[in-house]
Amino acid sequence: MRTVLFTKLFGSRGLDEIGPAVADLGFDGVDLLIRPGFSVTPDEADRLPGAVADLRALGLDVPMATTDLTDPANFPTAKVFGACADAGVGLIRLGYWNYDGSRPYDEIRDQARRDLDELERLAGSYGIGLAIQLHGGTIHSSGALARVLLEGRDPAAVSAYPDPGNQVVQDGREDWRLTFDLLRPWLSCVGVKNGGWFAGSTQESGERVWQSDWLGLADGMVPWPGILDRLRTTGFGGLLSFHSHYELPYEQVLDQTRTDLRFVRRCLEHASA
């Protein structure tokens, strides 16, 4: 398993700052966010090969990138795919097919399948793999729902990106063992974060409002030692992408991220002992 740091936490900071910070933290590499307002934007994808070369010069691998891509007609798809191929970035995380109750599930599912057919064809022409992340507010928030989109697809072309932290804090909760069992044939990357719920304010009606928050990996509701042991014993050799979605001052986010990485490595060392 290789550890990569998702660069969302760095915001619009330049890669000349991001690279040394990630290397200092001790990660194997970077999950590079390609999104407007961040260090690399979709319209500036031609910067990607040079940026990746600079990161690799620091000893960091860049095996994957994250995008908001769902509809290939409304995204500079060829530009981003071509830049990733030129840079040697082999896996692209896709965006979200959202669900809010305003459109029937069947309609969204059918559209997602058509989008995925076209994206799989395009990505294949560039030698790139795609990944679908489990995320709240989507039609792929759980292992069971994501599998509906993955059935019949080559795992080398379109893979699964489970995210137990999202499942705890957002929606799509299911037994984590079932999640990984359902998605095992397609598993390429696992999102690494943790969180939990707590009782908040009380409404005038008397209803108690519950709230969620992101917590350190050792402090939330996701049983990471058990998940990591399961990944190890089933021979998972893919990516662990750390997200660090902390509402903290920047330096504290880095400190917590360093602690999270050490926690995961201790869990893996203990599991293999």
Image (cartoon, grey):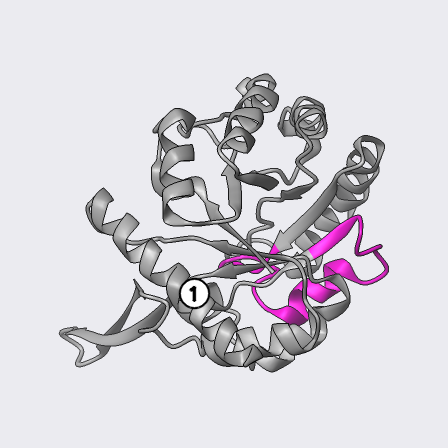
Residue 146 in the magenta stretch? The answer is: yes
In depth, the one of 69 and 65 nearer the eye is 65
Residue 52, magenta (yes or no): no
Q: The disc labelled 1 sits on which kind of residue?
A: Gln
Front-lying residue, 59 or 89: 59
The residue under the point 62% across, 44% down is 94
Q: How far across and down, in percent of the image, does residue 136 sit?
A: 49, 60
Q: At x 55% / y 32%, what residue is drawn?
A: 56
Residue 118 is left or right of residue 213, and the answer is right
Instruction: List x then y, in percent, for residue 7.
Output: 43, 41
**Residue 96 visible at all:** yes
Q: In this view, does 256 lie to the left or right of 156?
A: left
Q: Is 241 placed above or below 72 here? A: below
Give me the residue at 61% from left, 78% from top: 230
Q: Nearer the viewer, residue 82 or 134?
A: 82
Q: What segment carries the magenta color? A: 133-159
